[in-house]
Image: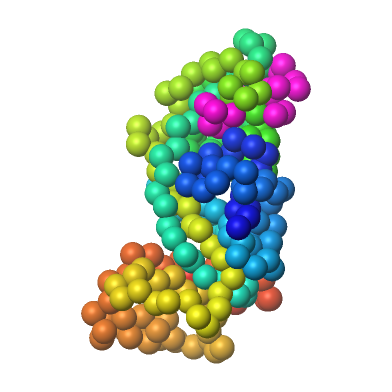
Amino acid sequence: PKTYVLGPHYSYSYNLAVAEYAPEDVVCVDAIADAVARAVAEDAAQAVVPVENMVGGSVRETLRAMYGAPVRIARAIDYTIRNVIAAQGEGYTTVASHAQALTQCAAYIPATGLAKKEVGATSGAMEMAAADPTVAAIGAPEAAAHYRLRVMDTAISDVATNVTRFLVVARADTTTEQTHGAKTSMMITPTEDRAGLLFEILSVFQIKKINLTKIESMPTGNKMNDYLFYI
């Protein structure tokens, strides 16, 4: 089966996918939403997508892509992120990367005096740096090696142990076996807006003695002050 990931090659999603699944079946796409959409549309396909970093928090692109889609989470994988800054040489004035990587290195970047440029993927930033000597990129060391860039610094993340949780998602179906004790994620969109509604939703978990590890609100995009809850 095909495994779709955010590309180009040697993004963190790609590196994880080729370590876990057959490399020849890993397909890079231009956006997380595209990876999820293809996994849902094709038989036996799946996508490996980042959902949360311990420093940068939730990856909203992934939550948005899953919202309203017939998707199931087959697996969650915690993956250690090793950010490096790489360039052709010393003459760079801008640092480029995905928004999550820039956040993970928020303490390091201001001290360099570099301008920041946000791009769609860490490996895309490495590709940019390979084409432009004024640009440095933050991403995986494997990407730096692939694009033949010089690693300028490795101690750039705000925390020494930097972990991102990835989800393996596929199309939901009624034959999916439910495992007792498995973790469950859900998105709840209230049909009304009134005082105490969120309390009522959450009280069910307390009554059933179910421990929650995460709750986050997100705008539905339908109108102002209209939110869904990711639990």
Whether residue 225 sits left or right of residue 56 in the image: it is: right
> How many callouts does the rendering have?
0
Residue at 49% across / 31% down in the picture?
83
Residue projecting furthest to the top: 90
Q: Which residues are magenta?
A: 127-143
Q: Is residue 163 above or below residue 180?
A: above
Residue at 66% across / 43% down in the picture?
7
Q: Nearer the viewer, residue 192 or 210?
A: 210
Whether residue 84 sits left or right of residue 135 in the image: it is: left
Whether residue 25 sits left or right of residue 210 in the image: it is: right
Q: Nearer the viewer, residue 200 or 52?
A: 52
Residue at 44% across / 86% down in the picture?
197
Relative image position of residue 138 (x, y in whole percent): 57, 30
Can residue 141 be found in the magenta stretch?
A: yes
Whether residue 124 sits left or right of residue 56 in the image: it is: right
Q: Is residue 66 visible?
A: no
